[in-house]
Image (cartoon, helix red, strand yellow):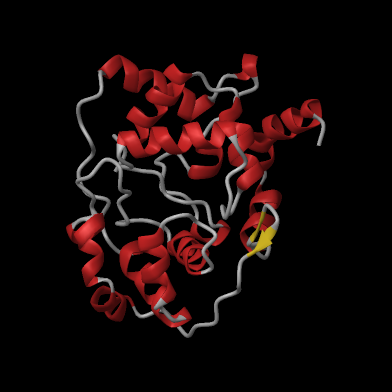
Amino acid sequence: MPTRFRSALLWLAPVLLASPIVAVALQTAPVSNTVPNVTLPALKFATPNAARGAQISANCAGCHGVGGVSKDDAVPSLAGQVASFTRQQLVAFKAKLLPDPTMQNIAGRLSDQDMADIAAHFATLSPGPAWKGADAAVRAQGAALYATGDPARKLIACSVCHGAGGRGNDSLILPSIANLAPAYAEGKLAEYREVVPYAHPSPQAMHAAAQGLTDEELTALAAYVSSLK
């Protein structure tokens, strides 16, 4: 898609999302799991059982923290993540489309029902306390970019997709980014700025949204989302 048309579509997004008709259409439309050059296998599962998911995922605490709240800024928290995104990531690891041997091995042993139950469990948990340490001015810069973007530079607001509080949208596989570790969030944004992300539910959108960000803005956005809970 030509850049000028893509930019126009990005800036129409807030207007379209504000329309009740479009909002209803988005909520009821089937969600595609197509990503660049690959289609993830569709999961087949009964009603997710969060209690069973808690039992199956007990060992996840070793890396992702007790209650799914990571203390390692290189490892994402899972607490409060929308279930659809957690399922999607587990499927991608199982299919070895995401490059983490440990997660590939873990996901490779899970059934479709296991993935659904684990995702349901983490979706019920609180994201935990906000990360601290970033300068208030840096967070404020990130907050402004998150809420409104930069119309003059055609930077779309993160809130358009991830919501005002960063909690995402389960029905659209839009992940929660609240309380992400600053280093992890900044690393992901830098990655999305450079390449179209692989095995991601919205690859082109994330690449387009991050492309115009400076290093300073990446740091500011990461500092802000890490303060959300």
Query: In the image, 15: left or right of 51?
Result: right
Figure check: 42 above or below 205? below
- Residue 187, image x and y in percent? 41, 35
The residue positioned 56% from the left and 31% from the top of the image is 193
Whether 104 is drawn above or below 142: the answer is below
Q: Nearer the viewer, residue 72 or 180?
A: 72
Location of the C terminus by quadrant is top left
Can residue 147 be seen in this snapshot? yes
Classify residue 178 as left or right of residue 112.
left
Residue 114 found in image quarter: bottom left
Q: Note whether 141 is above or below 95 in the view shown.
A: above
In which quarter of the view is residue 51 placed? bottom left
| Left/right of residue 105 with respect to residue 149 in the rendered view | left
Camera-nearest residue between 94 and 138: 94
Q: Residue at x 47, y 63 (%)?
A: 93
- In front: 103, or 176? 103
Q: What percent of the width, then of the height, locates residue 159? A: 50, 37
Can residue 143 be seen here? The reply is no
Q: Is residue 211 left or right of residue 190?
A: right
Residue 28, position as x, y percentages in the image? 65, 63
